[in-house]
Image (cartoon, helix red, strand yellow):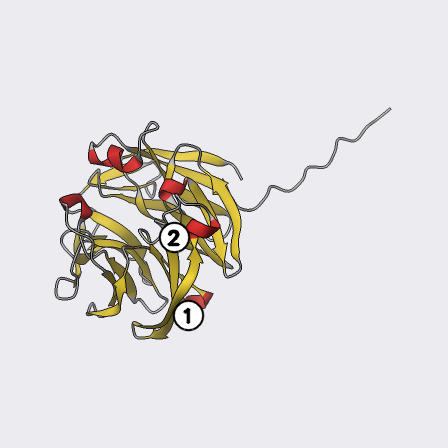
Amino acid sequence: MDMKTYARGLTWGEGPRFHHGALWVSDPQGGTIWTDSTGSWTASPQTSQPNGLWFLPDGRLTGAIIRERRVGVWDGSGFAEYADLKPVATGPLGDMVGDADGGLYVDDVGFAPHLGEKPRPGRIIYVAPDGTARIAADDVVFPNGLALIDGGRTLVVAETSAQRLVAYDVLGGGRLAGRRVFADLAELVGPEARPDGLCAAPDGVWACTLTGKAVVLVTADGVRTVIGTDDASPIACCTDGDSRLFVTLAHSDGRPVMDAVADKTVRTTVEVVDLVPAPPTDPPIETD
């Protein structure tokens, strides 16, 4: 599967979501939201620092605001208050995914590595449709990408520093149970694979492995598809339903990607992969 560049201009692309024919991506390092919903790839500067994005069933865009520990709702230029997570969040917020009823699951990373804080377990926070928040899961090791699969019955969480995906049964009302390892990416992909962003696939999840430099389709039976990204580091991904996969790729000119993040030399492109092969063309008809 070949990648083609879809968009440029980002510093660090997070939370890609495709909605009503348009792609939306947050850029927490660049302080912007990017979208082509107006017909051209455009950035909206933000005073907040949005990370994970999700569209509610009523079409409103929500964003997990990293340092403010709240979920905001897009008002056309920024993120107005939607849910205050400070009473339950212990660290910066990461990715976010939602269910069919309007509930949201949000990463609480638990600590701020960029501030030199020592690692401590994070948690998954559930935000009900009325905006109230509660802890859905605790003791999560650097929670990152999130994906709901099996018709919303299973939540898959990327534990980046543990190099694995874990799964929970979704019992309703934000309750999670039955924690288990869904995939050990260090074993299945390689020792450098650290899962970052996830998105649901019909039979599993697409996982960006960041330092593993591959996007992989993971099912209950293991890794089914591997898409290499050469020297670039895949951050996050989404699909447009079932025909295209969008991936944000960090470029660091051969340097360790987190070093490039630290000195603000990293740059991100959005790449697209066609998941549905083009139909074969008929051979030319030979004539005498």
Percent from the top left, x then y, of residue 159? 33, 55
Few, some or many C-alpha atoms within 10 Å of disc 2 (few <14, some 14-19, many ≥20)?
many
In depth, the one of 102 and 139 nearer the eye is 139
Give neighbour class at mark 1: few <14, some 14-19, many 20+ (Cα, 10 Å).
some
Question: Residue drawn at (13%, 54%), measured in percent from left and top?
Answer: 68
Mark nearer the N terminus (2 vs 1): 1
Q: Amino acid at mark 2?
A: Leu
Residue 227 horizontal/vertical position (percent): 49, 42
Q: Looking at the image, is 267 positioned above or below residue 177?
A: above
Check disc 1 and give the amino acid type. Arg
Q: Which residue is mark 1?
A: 153
Q: Does residue 19 appear left or right of residue 258 in this picture?
A: right
Q: Quadrant of residue 123?
A: bottom left
Q: Which residue bears the numbered disc 2?
A: 198
Q: Is residue 271 above or below residue 80?
A: above
Q: Secondary structure at mark 2?
A: strand
Could you say which is closer to the camera, residue 194 or residue 26? 194
- Give the residue drawn at x 25%, y 38%: 43
Q: CA distance from mark 2 to mark 1?
A: 16 Å
Q: Is residue 154 left or right of residue 71?
A: right
Q: Position of residue 48 (x, y in %)?
A: 15, 47
Instruction: Estimate the x, y position of residue 50 in percent, counting from the top left.
Output: 22, 49
